[in-house]
Amino acid sequence: MKIHYLQHVPFEGLGYIEEWATQSNHPVSVTRLFAGDSFPDMDEFDLLVIMGGPMSVNDIAEYPWLEREKAFIKKAIEQKKSVLGICLGAQLIANVLGSRIYKCKDKEIGWFPIFKTVHESEFEISKLFPEHIEVFHWHGETFDLPAGCINLAHSAVCENQAFVYNKNVVGLQFHLEATENSIWDLIKNASDEIVNAPYIQTADQMLLINTRVFRINQLMGNIMSYFTNK
């Protein structure tokens, strides 16, 4: 499986997905939108992974490449490529599928639980999600569930935390790919967002890793294997 990912800022890379791809012998390529890289042809990848970033889907005036990125994502979905969106990536998919993106009532930054929404056995990917799991968040916006999508998970703050579309397109509002290093990078580069608020943890709280990273990376690996076995 050839993996191509879209990177919006230098400090939000593939994280654990890179380790998984290396161990599984899946080649990886990248478009660094912040550096002006071009998009690949559709036949050059099997799975498109869209990473996070501090910008909003709606910040087209400041980041004009967002329009080209949305067109590329739409084309990938139309050509039935496997597509995975993480945080901003999930919002981009939702927007491409016709949903609005808007501010959450509260930002979620740190380790907070999500809860399984759908339990029907016919949705194979839903079987991968436990009834609840503590995951790493860093977002201030959310989205309406696009038409034709199945809601997989929710949190106390956001009703739509994960979704699947046509079985081959998955959006995750949270960061299952997070590693201790990637969390450090977010803290260093987005420290201005760490303020006193109900769902924002301190840097020290976020770095209380314990077995948290292992559990979310295990779920991330299972989702990657889902794409491999489709």
Image (tube, rainbow, N blue to C red):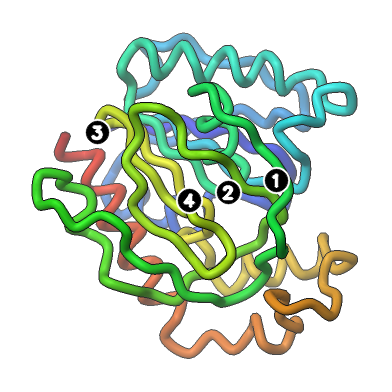
* Local SS, label 3: loop
* Local SS, label 2: loop
Q: Which residue is drawn at 54% across and 39% down?
A: 144
Residue at image mark 1: 53
Distance, label 3 to label 2, CA atoms, is 19 Å
Q: Which of marks 2 and 4 is nearer the N terminus?
A: 2
In the image, residue 18 lies at what x, y percent?
45, 51
Residue at image mark 4: 160
> Cβ–Cβ below 8 Å for labels 1 and 3?
no
In the image, residue 88 lies at what x, y percent?
62, 42
Q: Quadrant of the C terminus?
A: top left
Q: Point out the frontmost of discs 1 and 3.
A: 3
> Cβ–Cβ below 8 Å for labels 2 and 1?
yes
Instruction: Please indicate, yes or no, whether residue 99 appears anywhere in the rendered image.
Output: yes
Q: Residue at x 54, y 76 (%)?
A: 112
In the image, residue 127 lies at what x, y percent?
17, 57
Residue at image mark 2: 87
Q: Earlier in the sequence, mark 4 or mark 3?
A: 4
Q: In which quarter of the image is the N terminus?
A: top left
Q: In this view, does 64 lie to the left or right of 7?
A: right
Distance, label 1 to label 3, CA atoms, is 25 Å
Distance, label 4 to label 3, CA atoms, is 17 Å
Tell me the amino acid under the disc marked 4: Asn
Q: Which residue is drawn at 27% across and 62% down?
A: 129
Distance, label 2 to label 4, CA atoms, is 11 Å
Q: Which of marks 2 and 1 is nearer the N terminus?
A: 1
* Local SS, label 1: loop
Residue 79 position (above or below residue 111): above
Tell me the amino acid under the disc marked 2: Cys
Tell me the amino acid under the disc marked 1: Gly
Disc marking residue 167: 3
Instruction: Please tell me how crowded label 1 is: few (under 14), some (14-19), or many (20+) other residues with Cα within 10 Å.
Output: many
